[in-house]
Structures are given as C-alpha cells and as structure tokens.
Image (cartoon, helix red, strand yellow):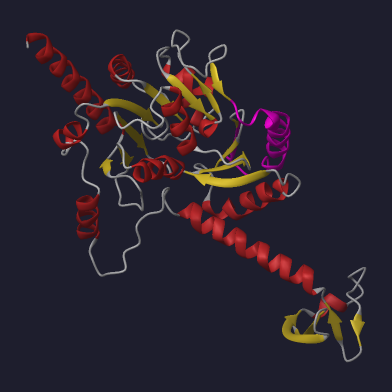
C-alpha cells in the first residue's frame, strides 16, 4: 500500500481539497488497463459532484437500512435507564389495552354511529414469511362478518384490493386496497360516489407505470435470495421479511436505482416491506376521510370511527382521527412504538376478541331497547 493524495476540485470556489488515501501500488501498475490520470505532483482528480453524490447516496441507503432494522412503526427508544418491563408499563399507561378499556370506549360512542376501519396484515391475519399465505382464521372472518352486520366496516390495506378480498371473502364490506387508492363498496349499498361498485381510483393514470416498474424490479431483485416483489395494482411492494439483513443495503440500492427513472413514484416503508407508490397526496388517512364522506359523515358529530392497524402506514389514519377529535385509533403491537393511536392490542387474537365484544355489546344494547 502507498499513500496517495486525492484532489477534489471545488468548482464554485476554485479550491482543491486534498484528501490523504491509502491506495494499493497495483492501482497504477500495468495490469490496470486505464489508470486514473495523475496531475503534477502525483495527484489525481475526482469530480466533486460525483464524489458528493455517491457519498450522499451511500448515506441515504444506510438510513433506509437503519429504518428497515427498526420495527414498523418505529419502536420507542428509551432515553432513560428504564428496564424493558418498566418501559412497556410506561407506554401502556399512555396507550392502554382496548380490551381493558372497552367500557370506556363504548361509553364514548354513545349516541353515535360506529364505523370500523381495519388493516389486514398483522391485524386480521398474522405476519407470515410468505405474503401469499397470510390467511385469516375462520374465527376472525366470523368476527369481522358479525361486526359488519351492525357497523359500516372497511378493510384498508396496502394490498391489491382483489387480493385482500380473496383472503377475507366477505361481500358486505368496503375494500380500500393499495393504501386507499382503489376503493370499492358493497354492490347493494347506495353510496353516492359509487359507479359500478367502484368508489374511487385516484391513481388510475399510474397503472401502466406501476406495471412497468413491477416488471423491472422482478428482474433487478433476482440476485437477492428470498426477496419478493408483489404487484398491488396501484403500488408495488418489495418484501424483505425473509431476506438476510446483510443483503438489505443491496436491495435498497436496486430499488432506488429503478426509481431514479420514475420521478412520479416515491419509495416508502411498511412492516418488513418497501413500497413504491405514486407521488399523489393519498394515503390511508385520506381513504378514511373519503369513506366517511361517502357514508354521509363528512362533517357529522354523530360518528365514531374506530381504526385498528399495526403498520407505519396506518399512522396516517390514526393522525386523521386525532386531528378530527373523533373516534379512536388502536395500534396492534406487542412492543412500545411511537404512534398516534390512543389504545393498543397485542396481536390479531386480541383484535378478534375486541370485535366479538363489540358485537356482544351492540346486541345487548339492541335487546335492551326492544324490552324498553
């Protein structure tokens, strides 16, 4: 190894910045077909723009990997010496169990129409290695079916709408796929926005672009074992839940390199998944607002929306409810996470128990009204 100085010219100020670097002697030996051109004094120059761009790109990829390493939403990072148990107990105080607080929740809904919004993966079904096998249990399906009998109910998911419908298989629900960019209501419902059953598809013009990116990503990610690319119609999902962590940086770099050619698409992250979406201002929170409006509750004070989800993308909906000062958000998580939700549930089984209690409470209320 020999020490060489690298001169990085500053085009704006006309200043050369010298960086000492250790370089192998073979770099300038005849075995290298085209050695870097040296300037007087044994220096060679590097274009500052390219040097900065590469450094910046490396930093961004590193940030993405750090984000991927965290749970989704981001886990709470303790700034104190609290033990893990103390930290969880502290978090539960601010985000109590929706089961433990059930009576308080239904009391807050008195005289109002409850409207249910449910994420799918990690909420109605467990997170599994193969996203094509994220089946919900029959017991969960029955709980969702019964809830929909008493309350307007929507499935709001990043999945393709047709895909999640094949999992749920319940006709009386609203389905908002692709993070709410593909909304369809029950065919028998008289929703004022309905046209042939489809309520809203704000990103239709992006369909050819999404298909193109999906095809390119399939090819680009072939070299990354167990990476899975999924076409969710109005967005593309790149699942990395089964990819070795040492390959994450390569995966991000491949995905970002593809998106460089598509400035109208953006990269976001969910739970063990990278997602490519149109740059339009639409998310699960917008979908929630749209569905409330289509149900006639746009500016109503007589509605009580309940949104249950486990993902970072569900935070947009939690935030909308908090800003409206109506209803509540419930985060599904076993660990403390930064969230705009008011309550928590640990896992899909607790979601099922909560839905069943809601149905039992409603049935009991109706029976009491009949007797009166």
Q: Write the start and end of the magenta stretch as one range.
A: 201-230
Q: Is residue 291 left or right of residue 208?
A: left
**Residue 221 at what x, y percent from top left?**
67, 42
> In the displayed image of the protein, which residue is found farthest to the bottom?
41
Foreground residue among 17 and 294: 294
Residue 306 visible, this orientation: yes
Q: Is residue 138 left or right of residue 273?
A: left
Foreground residue among 48 and 246: 48
Q: Residue at x 26, y 26 (%)?
A: 355
Residue 309: image quadrant is top left
Residue 16: image quadrant is bottom right
Foreground residue among 276 and 33: 276
Q: Is residue 235 magenta?
A: no
Q: Is residue 265 above or below residue 32?
A: above
The N terminus, quarter of image: bottom right
Q: Is residue 220 magenta?
A: yes
**Residue 107 at what x, y percent from top left?**
16, 33
**Residue 211 at what x, y percent from top left?**
70, 30
Tag count: 0
Residue 4 visible, this orientation: no
Q: Residue at x 52, y 52 (%)?
A: 245
The C terminus, quarter of image: top left
Q: Residue at x 15, y 37 (%)?
A: 104
**Residue 53 at what x, y percent from top left?**
73, 66
Q: Residue at x 56, y 46 (%)?
A: 268
Q: Is residue 276 above or below residue 32?
A: above
Residue 102: image quadrant is top left
Q: Is residue 195 above or below residue 346?
A: above
Q: Is residue 98 left or right of residue 166?
A: left
> In the displayed image of the protein, which residue is found farthest to the left?
372
């Amino acid at each position: 190894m020999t020490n060489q100085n690298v001169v990085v010219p500053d085009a704006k100020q006309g200043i050369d910045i010298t960086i000492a670097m250790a370089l192998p002697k073979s770099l300038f030996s005849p075995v290298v077909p085209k050695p870097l051109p040296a300037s007087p004094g044994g220096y060679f120059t590097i274009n500052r723009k390219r040097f900065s761009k590469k450094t910046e790109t490396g930093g961004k990829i590193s940030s993405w990997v750090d984000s991927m390493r965290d749970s989704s939403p981001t886990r709470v990072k303790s700034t104190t010496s609290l033990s893990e148990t103390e930290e969880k107990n502290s978090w539960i105080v601010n985000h109590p169990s929706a089961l433990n607080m059930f009576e308080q929740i239904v009391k807050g809904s008195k005289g109002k129409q409850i409207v249910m919004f449910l994420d799918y993966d990690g909420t109605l079904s467990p997170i599994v290695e193969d996203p094509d096998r994220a089946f919900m249990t029959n017991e969960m399906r029955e709980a969702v079916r019964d809830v929909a009998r008493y309350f307007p109910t929507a499935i709001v998911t990043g999945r393709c709408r047709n895909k999640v419908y094949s999992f749920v298989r319940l006709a009386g629900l609203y389905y908002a796929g692709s993070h709410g960019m593909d909304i369809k209501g029950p065919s028998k419902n008289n929703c004022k926005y309905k046209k042939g059953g489809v309520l809203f598809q704000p990103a239709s013009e992006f369909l050819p672009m999404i298909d193109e990116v999906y095809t390119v990503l399939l090819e680009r990610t072939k070299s990354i074992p167990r990476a899975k690319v999924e076409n969710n119609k109005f967005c593309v999902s790149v699942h990395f839940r089964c990819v070795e962590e040492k390959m994450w940086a390569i995966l991000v770099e491949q995905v970002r390199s593809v998106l460089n050619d598509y400035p109208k698409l953006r990269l976001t992250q969910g739970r063990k998944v990278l997602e490519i979406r149109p740059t339009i201002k639409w998310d699960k929170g917008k979908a929630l607002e749209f569905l409330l409006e289509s149900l006639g509750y746009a500016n109503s004070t007589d509605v009580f929306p309940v949104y249950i989800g486990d993902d970072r993308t569900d935070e947009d909906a939690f935030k909308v409810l908090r800003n409206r000062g109506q209803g509540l958000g419930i985060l599904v998580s076993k660990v403390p996470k930064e969230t705009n939700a008011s309550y928590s549930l640990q896992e899909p089984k607790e979601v099922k128990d909560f839905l069943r209690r809601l149905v039992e409470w409603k049935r009991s209320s109706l029976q009491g009204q009949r007797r009166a």
